[in-house]
Amino acid sequence: MKVFIKILLFCFATGVYICSNGTLVYSDTYVSGNITADTVWRKSDSPYIVTATVQVFQNITLTIEPGVIIKFNPSTGLTIGGKLVAIGTAEAPITFTSNAPTPASKDWGRIKFVDTAQDASFDSAGNYSDGCIIKNCLIEFGKGIWCENSSPLISSNYIRKTSDYGGIFFGGASDKVKIVYNTLEENGFPIYLNGTFASLEILNNKVRRNYDGLLIETCPAGTLIKDNIIEYNGANNVGGISVRSGSGSIISNFISHNQDTSWNAAIYCENVTFTIHNNQILSNHNQAIASNNSYLTVTNNQIVGNKGYAVWIEGNHVPGTIRFNDLVNLGDFEIFRFDSNGGSVDATNNWWGTTDLGTIEQRVFDYYDDITKVKVIFSPIATASFFPSYVVAYVAANGICGGKYPCFSSIQNGVDSAGCFGTGTIYITQETYDENVILSSPKVLLFKGGWDSTFTAIQSNTTINGSLTISNGSLILDAGGLIVE
């Protein structure tokens, strides 16, 4: 029953009630069981209440219109053995949610694609043409999207508060796996892939504040992980990205402030051949990159401010190359060569935050520290950073900075990231921040406060309700928009 009880007294008792004041009030539509003929779930019949799991049979299409809301009772879900076309719009997304009065994670089951589901297909330009698709949908409070021996296109969705392997899971044998332009927040594993795939692309996703990061057990040749934002994840196993076998590329990702209590790296590589290129790997809580029995080409990355090493290497494979990167981190070493096998490591032409060869030598653990290990060749070195010396950070208390990056939810995190190579500016929203801020490295930072949520104009003041302590470096406080109490 709707909340419009008083108004309904004046309505006709039809599926869509037309009230005396001209208002349209839609009744609930209850669904369950098997769909054996092509079916459309229309906005005019929304919301749909799933009272028992709905199954779409092989060669049957379920189409869901933009703006439809589907609410699931406990232990129910949607199983696709045919074709699902769920394409919302930015203005009218399709919602898959709980029917509980107070929704919570695991309230309902999952959207499940099985072997007979029609795989997504694409034209020669890579655009979707047919098959299963979930696009512009909100998926929340269940167990996410589960794909077993199937390959739907998963694009432009907001997936939140799912559990277990919730978020997005692919298993079994699948064709082209394409996960693009999604936002995944507060899930268990946001993306977990454990199967055999013909091809794999993970592009332009925002993966934030999940219990884990991205875990890919097997990477087909040509795997591409590109242009993703992966931040503030991990209290379990994977903080950033973990690839366990196969080959591919990790390119142009922003990977920041992730934790990892198992494999201890923002990017963990095991038994793989991978290119890691042009990424920003900043202020993670452990190693930036860990290589185990892998051949890695690590080039043109900004690897800065991480609490562990820049690159940890162990295992039997030839270690590959580490060149043209900025390596300025907080661990005891930048490169730690743990094993005694394989050839020497080519780590030439990196910027180490200094040109003093003696200092750099102390930042490398290799043969010269333990003769059972293998050498790291680091000279010649770069004499300046490969990235702009004037580094910017944005700070908003909710961790959302109007699409600007790098974005942090505390001023201290912004201080740790900005000005990695000497100077920087920190733009801060017009809020009160209850924290003590410490600058302990030789940076020169300019604080500019009072910005609106999109950082287009200064509207009011930023208040830092705490202390500013400078043990090294310099802080310049912009006179407008900033109050320190």
Image (cartoon, grey):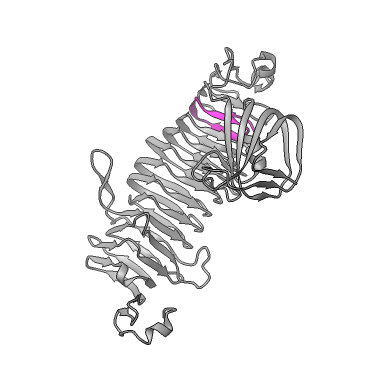
| Rendered location of residue 426, percent (x, y) | 61, 37
Total numbered badges shown on the rendered structure:
0
Residue at 46% from the left image edge and 43% from the top image edge:
216
> From the image, which quarter does the N terminus lie in?
bottom left
Of residues 128 and 238, the one drawn nearer to the viewer in this rendering: 128
Residue at 53% from the left image edge and 54% from the top image edge:
186
| Rendered location of residue 393, percent (x, y) | 58, 37
Of residues 365 and 97, the one drawn nearer to the viewer in this rendering: 97
Q: From what the image shows, is residue 103 above or below residue 129?
A: below
Residue at 31% from the left image edge and 72% from the top image edge:
45
Drawn side of residue 412 relative to residue 100, left or right: right
Of residues 40 and 474, the one drawn nearer to the viewer in this rendering: 474
Residue 314 visible to the viewer: no
Magenta stretch holds residue 80: no
Of residues 39 and 8, the one drawn nearer to the viewer in this rendering: 8
Quarter of the image where one finds residue 43: bottom left
Residue 479 visible to the viewer: yes
Q: From what the image shows, is residue 36 above or below residue 152?
A: below
Q: From what the image shows, is residue 295 above or below residue 450?
A: above
Residue at 49% from the left image edge and 67% from the top image edge:
107
Magenta stretch holds residue 290: yes
Range covered by the magenta-colored residues: 287-312
Drawn side of residue 240 relative to residue 119, left or right: right
Predominant SS of the magenta segment: strand
Drawn side of residue 484 relative to residue 283, left or right: right
Quarter of the image where one finds residue 218: top left
Drawn side of residue 378 relative to residue 31, left or right: right
| Rendered location of residue 452, percent (x, y) | 55, 47
